[in-house]
Each structure stands twice: as structure tokens, then as C-alpha cells.
């Protein structure tokens, strides 16, 4: 059966990016939440294990359970902590919750990490709770104390130094334990931010850890393509798609591509983004609909029905595509539909 759209993933490139982050930041764990950022745990985790990754972070209990089946010996941290009723499953699957409140510290007696809030103001112990947490943990030190940078992707943000200072203050109060502050962006802020463990996420999957600040230090790992179903010639002034939001300024050739917002291509990409066909960029014309996108291929020599169009990948960087869709690389990847098959290839 012909595929009208597919996601090609290069697991070896994911593993190479993990190795790159480890060289930069020292001891590293892989963040594989949201089904490995939409690329598929089953396709990505074996390559990370082969590269020597022994520690992973997920967000939810269910993600940890799925990961445990793939990585029986790994240390798996669950960022959501211990929501009511999840304790037995966490214990039976040997998952390590990241505790973020005094209540969780009191309720959970097993192996745990501790999350300290240093300015993100989401999960984690607020500064005023750190001393009490230290008292409650005096006889059972956490296996890890962590926090999360709000602006690690921006090396010029003064908030990075502020959070680093607050994190050090918290560590001085808490029982001695390994510490972790840096995710992908923080890895490239320097050694002061590395501590005992770095936690790369988007950088493993080809997203720039610090967009707009130099060349991307990691490899492309994923390519989204769709198939051209039909070519149509239109005259100057004719419109394309719902709402007539595009009118041709010249006689044009329009390709109808078999992808749409049901596949995860955001509607906001209409009349803004582009695809690459036969080495040439072809702009989106008209609105992105549920299953179809119009492309202006007038200047693409030799274009034909059945050709593949790349929406991001080696020819069109992930972060550039995300910006054109009006989003960021994280949302672009995790929003890709499950109706698109993930095809895992040995080499890029």
C-alpha cells in the first residue's frame, strides 16, 4: 500500500545527539516523555540504550510503564511525581517519582528524586518549603535533587544566573545528593550549570538547544514527507483552498499534497510555510485543510504526481519549519498524528 505521508526517523542520529550532549555536559540522562517527543519510544530507546544511556526521564506514570518494558535495567524518573493512587504502580514498575511538594515527601517512602522550584513557578518545592523538606528527608536523602531553567534556551537571559544561585542555595540546605539543573539549552550554558547530571530532551531529536544562537550543534533525526496527489494549472487571479485566502499572481501550477492538520500540520502554516520538492522550495498556498495542502510548484522543474515533498528534515531544518508554522520544534514534533507511520531507518 502506498504511503501518502510518513515520518522517517534515524535512531542512530538520536544516539549520536545523546553522545554529543554527554560530551558537552558530562553524565547524561535522556528525556523521552511524550513517546520520545512524538518519534516513538520503541524506535528510539533501543538506540539510546546501545549508546550507553542508563537513565531516562518521562512525565507520566503510563510513559514510565511503557519505558520499563523496553529498558528493564534503566533508572527511570517520573516528573509528575506521585499523584493520588499512583503509588502502587510506581513501586511495582520500579519507577522513581520526582517529588515536588511536602505532601508528596510525606506520602512517598521509597526511592525518590526531589524537584526544587527556582523560578519556573510550576512543579517543585517553593523556596519557603526547602528547609522543611530537608527536615523530613534527613534520614532518607533523595537520589537526585533537580530544578528546571525557564530560559536555558537563551544564553543572554539574566534569569539563568538567578536560578543557578537559587539552586545552589537549596542544595546547601538539603541533604547531600547528586544534582541536576540543565536540560538541552542548559547543557550549552557552561560547566556551572552541569552539576552531576544533564537531562537533554529536544536536543536529542534535532531541535536547536538555543535557537538563534549559532549553528545547531545536533544532527537532524527526523523527516516528514507527504505525497503529491495531483497537479492543477490555474490562471492569474484564481484562488486555492477554503476561504479563498490565496489568489495566484500569475498562471501557476498547484500541487495538492496528502497531508493536513489531521496529520499534525498546523492550520496556521497556511500561506506561510513551504515544502521542498526536487531540491526546490514550494510555498504553501491557501489554508491547510484536514487532509490536504496546496503548494505552488510553478518553479519546480519536473514535478509530477507521486513526488514526495519534505515539510521538515535534512533539506528544511526543524526549527525553521516550526517558526513558519507559528510554533516551536517541541509542539511540532509532539503534535504529529499517529495516522502517520514512523519509519525507522538505519542511516541518514
Image (tube, helix red, strand yellow):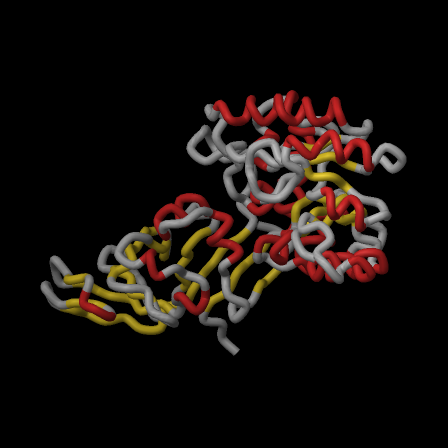
Q: Is residue 209 above or below residue 346?
A: above
Q: Is residue 140 left or right of residue 259?
A: right
- Horizontally, is 3 left or right of 258 in the view? right
Q: Position of residue 218 (x, y in %)?
A: 56, 38
Residue that protrudes farthest toward the right in the picture: 139
Task: Answer yes or no: is residue 52 visible.
Answer: no
Residue 330 at least partly seen: yes
| Number of marks in picture | 0
Residue at 24%, 55% in the rendered image: 299
At horizontal 72% and vertical 59% (from top left) the residue drawn is 84
Q: Nearer the viewer, residue 267 or 16?
A: 267
As drawn, 13 above or below 160: below
Q: Is residue 222 above or below residue 241?
A: above
How far across and how far down the image is residue 270, in percent? 30, 59
Place residue 233 in its image quadrant. Answer: bottom left
Image position of 58 with respect to 246: above or below: above
Q: Nearer the viewer, residue 307 or 91?
A: 91
Which residue is at a point 16% across and 69% down the rendered structure image?
Answer: 234
**Left or right: 83 with respect to 255?**
right
Q: Is residue 244 left or right of residue 198?
A: left
Camera-side residue: 54 or 252? 54
Q: Residue furthest bottom?
A: 1
Residue 23 percent location from the top left of the image = 68, 30
Q: Where's residue 125, x and y in %? A: 67, 38
Residue at 51% of width from left, 33% of height from top? 151
Q: Quadrant of residue 67?
A: bottom right
Amino acid at each position: 500500500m502506498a504511503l501518502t505521508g510518513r515520518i522517517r526517523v534515524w535512531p542512530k542520529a538520536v544516539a549520536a545527539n545523546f553522545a554529543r550532549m554527554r560530551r558537552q555536559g558530562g553524565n547524561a540522562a535522556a528525556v523521552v516523555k511524550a513517546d520520545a517527543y512524538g518519534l516513538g519510544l520503541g524506535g528510539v530507546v533501543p538506540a539510546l540504550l546501545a549508546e550507553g544511556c542508563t537513565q531516562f526521564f518521562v512525565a507520566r506514570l503510563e510513559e514510565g510503564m511503557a519505558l520499563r518494558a523496553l529498558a528493564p535495567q534503566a533508572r527511570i524518573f517520573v516528573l509528575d511525581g506521585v499523584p493520588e493512587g499512583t503509588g502502587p504502580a510506581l513501586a511495582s514498575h520500579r519507577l522513581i517519582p520526582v517529588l515536588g511538594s511536602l505532601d508528596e515527601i510525606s506520602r512517598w517512602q521509597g526511592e525518590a528524586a526531589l524537584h526544587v522550584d527556582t523560578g519556573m513557578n510550576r512543579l517543585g518545592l517553593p523556596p519557603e518549603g526547602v528547609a522543611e523538606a530537608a527536615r523530613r528527608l534527613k534520614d532518607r536523602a533523595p537520589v537526585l535533587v533537580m530544578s528546571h531553567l525557564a530560559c536555558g534556551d537563551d544564553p543572554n537571559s539574566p534569569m539563568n544566573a538567578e536560578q543557578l544561585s537559587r539552586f545552589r542555595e537549596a542544595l546547601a540546605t538539603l541533604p547531600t545528593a547528586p544534582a541536576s539543573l540543565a536540560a538541552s539549552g542548559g547543557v550549552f550554558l557552561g560547566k556551572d550549570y552541569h552539576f552531576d547530571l544533564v537531562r537533554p530532551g529536544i536536543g536529542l531529536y534535532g531541535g536547536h538547544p538555543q535557537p538563534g544562537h549559532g549553528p545547531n550543534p545536533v544532527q537532524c533525526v527526523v523527516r516528514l514527507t507527504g505525497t503529491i496527489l495531483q497537479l492543477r494549472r490555474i490562471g492569474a487571479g484564481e484562488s486555492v483552498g477554503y476561504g479563498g485566502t490565496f489568489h495566484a499572481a500569475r498562471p501557476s501550477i498547484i500541487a495538492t499534497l496528502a497531508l493536513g492538520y489531521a496529520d499534525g500540520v498546523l492550520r496556521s502554516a497556511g500561506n506561510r510555510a513551504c515544502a521542498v520538492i526536487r531540491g526546490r522550495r514550494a510555498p504553501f498556498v491557501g489554508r491547510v485543510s484536514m487532509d490536504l495542502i496546496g503548494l505552488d510548484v510553478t518553479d519546480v522543474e519536473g514535478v509530477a504526481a507521486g513526488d514526495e515533498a519534505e515539510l521538515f528534515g535534512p533539506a528544511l531544518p526543524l526549527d525553521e519549519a516550526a517558526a513558519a508554522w507559528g510554533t516551536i520544534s517541541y509542539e511540532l514534533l509532539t503534535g504529529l498524528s499517529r495516522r502517520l507511520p514512523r519509519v525507522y531507518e538505519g542511516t541518514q
